[in-house]
Image: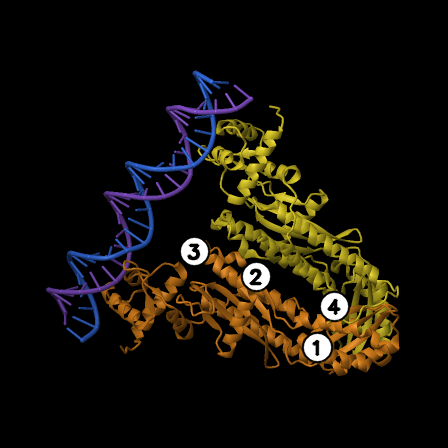
Chain colours: A yellow, B orange, C blue, D purple
Amino acid sequence: MKMELTERKKRILKSIVDSYIESGEPIGSKFLTTSYDFSVSPATIRNEMSELEDMGYLEQPHTSAGRVPTSLGFKTYVNSLMEKYFLTMEELSVLDELTSFKINELNRTLEQASKVISRLTNYTSFSVLRSPEDMALRYETLLIDAASLLIVMICENDIVKSSRVKVSLPVDEAAVKAIQDALNTNLIKRHADDITMPVFMAFEKALGKYAHFASDCVKAVYEMLSADSKEHVHVDGVTKLLSYPEYSSVSNAKSVLAIIEEQNKLIELLYGLSEDKQNLYISDDESDGILPAKDTSFVFHPITYNGKTVGAIGVIGPKRMDYKKVIASLNYLASGISIELNEKKRKGEPETIPRPGHEL
Amino acid sequence: MKMELTERKKRILKSIVDSYIESGEPIGSKFLTTSYDFSVSPATIRNEMSELEDMGYLEQPHTSAGRVPTSLGFKTYVNSLMEKYFLTMEELSVLDELTSFKINELNRTLEQASKVISRLTNYTSFSVLRSPEDMALRYETLLIDAASLLIVMICENDIVKSSRVKVSLPVDEAAVKAIQDALNTNLIKRHADDITMPVFMAFEKALGKYAHFASDCVKAVYEMLSADSKEHVHVDGVTKLLSYPEYSSVSNAKSVLAIIEEQNKLIELLYGLSEDKQNLYISDDESDGILPAKDTSFVFHPITYNGKTVGAIGVIGPKRMDYKKVIASLNYLASGISIELNEKKRKGEPETIPRPGHEL
DNA sequence: CGTTTGCACATAATAAAAACGAGTGCCAAA
DNA sequence: TTTGGCACTCGTTTTTATTATGTGCAAACG
């Protein structure tokens, strides 16, 4: 059955999705004619709706109800039907809170972004900071006192981690220097699992007469790496989900909360999608396997740094969420963060830019 | 109306609470006689129950139902009636996972503890890391390259933070040294808000000819302090709550989830209670103002370090939670963590303890 | 005087039946 | 191609009846 998506069908579909987003209730033919002025009778609309249903854009919860957009319906709505949303001044000022409150750590920036998004859209939001794979790594060491030294791990993407190492034998500057050199030649792998026994032994050997510090140092590095190499997920506004009728049944609420809590699922999903260059996921009722949450959709936007995707911010909500607003907000924030990152990078080079006065 | 809590009343109350914890349903007189062998008739039990109700230990949801313990009932149960719970070998091994996987940072230790507790008890768990107020503070600085330096903040309680400062004018060892000295004399206050304009100016003055670095450095310190001086809350096993019938109504679920999300409330509550030397909170239906969650209780256990309370781990669940198990688990874990902390402290002093072999 | 027995009363939970209403599908006519 | 009319379906709500459980009380018992 081949069929054309005529102008009128488009308009009807758009109206249905719009109305459904607002009300959450199935949309009937009569409702459409009264509130949208199609200058045709309900019966005509019914015919069109019937065809839209055959084409897979709509479906009926049951015989005697109005119609509801399918996932396909929502997707085409997002991709070609919905109008652009222009953020109001108030909304922009909410979003700008983030960038005005400058934070060095990407980690916390993303958390803040998530908070802001949730507040603005009234959906649950999340942020993911990817593990910085393949980024160059180097170490600095610092003598703190005779019993402890500090190992500083500096990653290409500005992230700095440090760990204080307490040792039982006295250390001195020379030892610290030796440790630094040994670290920088032997422990430059990015993942905690890369530190195998041979690596450890090579490191120990490189330390020479300071080999007795090897164990403590490697342990510290191992901890820093393993804390760093896992993705950091942050979720905000969980309770907001529960305000929407689609989650008024506890079983539904539970399934979506489970996803939120099982953050690995979320990460998996993001990875899968970002390969597809897609950034909208709508959970299908036929449960395509990835996520078992009914009537739920995910929208997210990647955060890039130097062309690489270093994270994402996004929104989780009912399938009928206000996509135009959500997408507009995510775009705005995400590009803001990405720009800031890149600027910071530029600023990082020693270029003798005139400093602004102190701001506190 | 003055009344004695006789032995038999105690036994009846205990039986009721035990049964109610298990079933979650109101307990009737007949049920008690059949399952507990009181060698009296239901009518006698009824009389006793009626008196227990007058005394405030029990209440009836409605006329034709069994009885349910009140908050007072639960409290007396926890304080004097319930038997001690002995953790099984399996349970101990779950708990011991935590200590076997040694982590340096208190922060992550508490998170892990929270995870373990949630898994073991099947309730929602949380951990709070208090802001380290009044702890001594000092700085180390490190030259990274001509365009950036590292400020390391070392706190008495082993927590080390660092921030890389990028500057536009070239720095050298002398400058770094000057910065370190200036920091250690002028910025030793613990809270971000303590950095006022006069403090900043004093710091700038102390820097002498390196005053142009002042702004960037103070900004970095400010960020570290403000990230540090707020409490860190971690919550685990949220979805587990929803399995209990008391949260099958969405409104109830929402109210308790709101608390979990509004972490400030949680912190407030903990502070309030730890002053009272109490560590059990049962949300009263009359809503005593602090927390508006029905049928919910909180149990937590402080984590101490050098006698000071540095945090807490705890459990949130239905009022009828399995207190004996929860309390036993919390005790075990919390004391384990506290001991480890204190040991680490001792180990920190240079005492030339023979090192164990490397463990990876 | 504490305990027991028996019975009436209250009420939540469950089930079944009835009335309602919103919306479609289809057909014949414009 | 569109429209009005109308029967039909099916979820929702309301009503009514039924059942079950546990208490409270009074009178009887040891």
Determine the image quadrant of residue A185. Answer: bottom right
Residue tagged by mark 3?
A: B245
Q: Amino acid at mark 1?
A: Ile
Mark closest to the chain's N terminus, 1 or 3: 1
Q: What distance separates the C-alpha of mark 2 from that of mark 4?
A: 27 Å
Q: Is residue A334 left or right of residue A265?
A: right
Chain letter of the residue carrying label 4? A
Instruction: Name the N-terminal-most of marks 2 and 1.
Output: 1
- Marked residue chain, label 3: B
Of tags 1 and 3, which is closer to the observer? 1
Residues flagged by tags 3 and 2 on a common chain:
yes
- Could you give the CA–CA distance between mark 4 and mark 1, rounded to whole angstroms? 36 Å
Q: Which label belongs to residue B195?
A: 1
Mark 3, Cα crowd under 10 Å, few <14 / some 14-19 / many 20+, is few
Q: Residues within 10 Å of mark 2 (few under 14, many from 20)?
A: many
Same chain, labels 4 and 1: no
Residue B213: image quadrant is bottom right
At a point 78% along the width and 78% down the height, the residue shown is: A144
In this rendering, position of residue C27 left or right of residue A334: left
Q: In the rendered view, tell whether residue D2 sits above or below residue B186.
A: above
Identify the mark nearer the N-term, 3 or 2: 2
Local secondary structure at mark 2: strand
Host chain of mark 1:
B
What residue would you read off at disc 2?
Answer: B236
Q: Is residue A177 left or right of residue B224?
A: right
Q: CA distance from mark 1 to mark 3?
A: 50 Å
Let me know if marks 2 and 1 both belong to one chain. yes
| Figure quadrant of the N terminus of chain B | bottom left
